[in-house]
Image: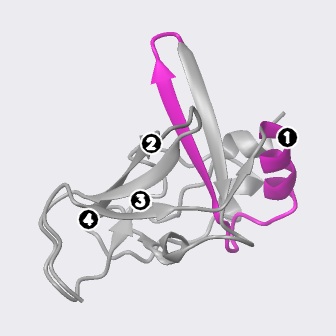
């Protein structure tokens, strides 16, 4: 309803924090072509990495209703507030005029190539309309492998 200046905090993507096993179980029980509210946040620290899974399927806030775009106006950033577990915060990539739809790249900016075989046939079509559209919504393929 109002303009948002570049770099401003917009909202948090909140939900249940899941373990690796729980995230894999839930992902396997859902179809990537349907709604999936599991956000995977990967952080890299030299040779080490930390993965945090946030599932807003059952518990969440307004962040779970923000759509994907291959050319988004928000970005996600891990933020730690008095805790080692990161919170997923969304910030404005640029100045956003009032009454503009908010969006972020569900892949986190990672170039996810289409995988081969049956799984690529179940990918949900991306309808963002961007000139940089990847034609399908991203999903975390590692959740479907052991």
Task: Kindly identify which residue carries mark 4.
Answer: 73
Q: Which mark is residue 134?
A: 3
Task: Tell me the distance, in whole angstroms, between the alpha carbons under discs 3 and 4.
Answer: 16 Å
Nearer-N-terminus badge (1/2):
1
Q: Is residue 20 above or below residue 119?
A: above
At a point 13% along the width and 66% down the height, the residue shown is 5
Task: Tell me the distance, in whole angstroms, between the alpha carbons under discs 3 and 1.
Answer: 29 Å
Nearer-N-terminus badge (3/4):
4
Task: Tell me the distance, in whole angstroms, between the alpha carbons under discs 4 and 2.
Answer: 17 Å
| Contact flag, marks 2 and 3 (Cβ < 8 Å) | no
Which numbered disc, 2 or 3, marks the residue closer to the eye? 2
Nearer-N-terminus badge (1/4):
1
Residue 26 location (% of width, % of height): 83, 57
Task: Tell me the distance, in whole angstroms, between the alpha carbons under discs 1 and 2.
Answer: 21 Å
Which numbered disc, 3 or 1, marks the residue closer to the eye? 1
Q: Is residue 21 above or below residue 69?
A: above
Q: Quadrant of residue 119?
A: bottom right
At a point 69% along the width and 63% down the height, the residue shown is 121
Which numbered disc, 3 or 4, marks the residue closer to the eye? 4
| Contact flag, marks 3 and 4 (Cβ < 8 Å) | no
Magenta region includes residue 39:
yes
In the displayed structure image, the side of residue 142 where residue 25 appears, left or right: right
Q: Which residues are magenta?
A: 20-47
The crowding category of the residue bearing disc 4, from other C-alpha atoms within 10 Å (few below 14, some 14 to 19, many at least 20), is many
At a point 37% along the width and 58% down the height, the residue shown is 90
Q: Secondary structure at mark 1?
A: helix
The crowding category of the residue bearing disc 2, from other C-alpha atoms within 10 Å (few below 14, some 14 to 19, many at least 20), is some
Task: Kindly identify which residue carries mark 2.
Answer: 78
Q: Secondary structure at mark 3?
A: loop
Q: Quadrant of the N terminus?
A: bottom left
Task: Kindly identify which residue carries mark 1.
Answer: 21
Q: Secondary structure at mark 4?
A: loop
């Amino acid at each position: 309803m109002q303009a948002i200046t570049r770099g401003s905090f917009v909202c948090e993507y909140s939900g249940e924090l899941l373990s690796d096993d729980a995230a894999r179980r839930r992902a396997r029980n859902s179809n990537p072509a349907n709604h999936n509210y599991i956000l995977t946040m990967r952080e890299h620290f030299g040779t080490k990495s930390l993965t945090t899974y946030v599932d807003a399927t059952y518990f969440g806030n307004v962040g779970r209703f923000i759509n994907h775009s291959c050319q988004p106006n928000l970005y996600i950033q891990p933020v730690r507030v008095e805790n080692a577990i990161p919170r997923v915060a969304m910030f404005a990539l640029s100045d956003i005029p009032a009454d503009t739809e908010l969006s972020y790249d569900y892949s986190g900016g990672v170039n996810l190539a289409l995988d081969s075989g049956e799984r690529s046939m179940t990918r949900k079509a991306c309808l963002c309309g961007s000139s940089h559209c990847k034609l399908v919504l991203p999903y975390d393929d590692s959740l479907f492998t052991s």
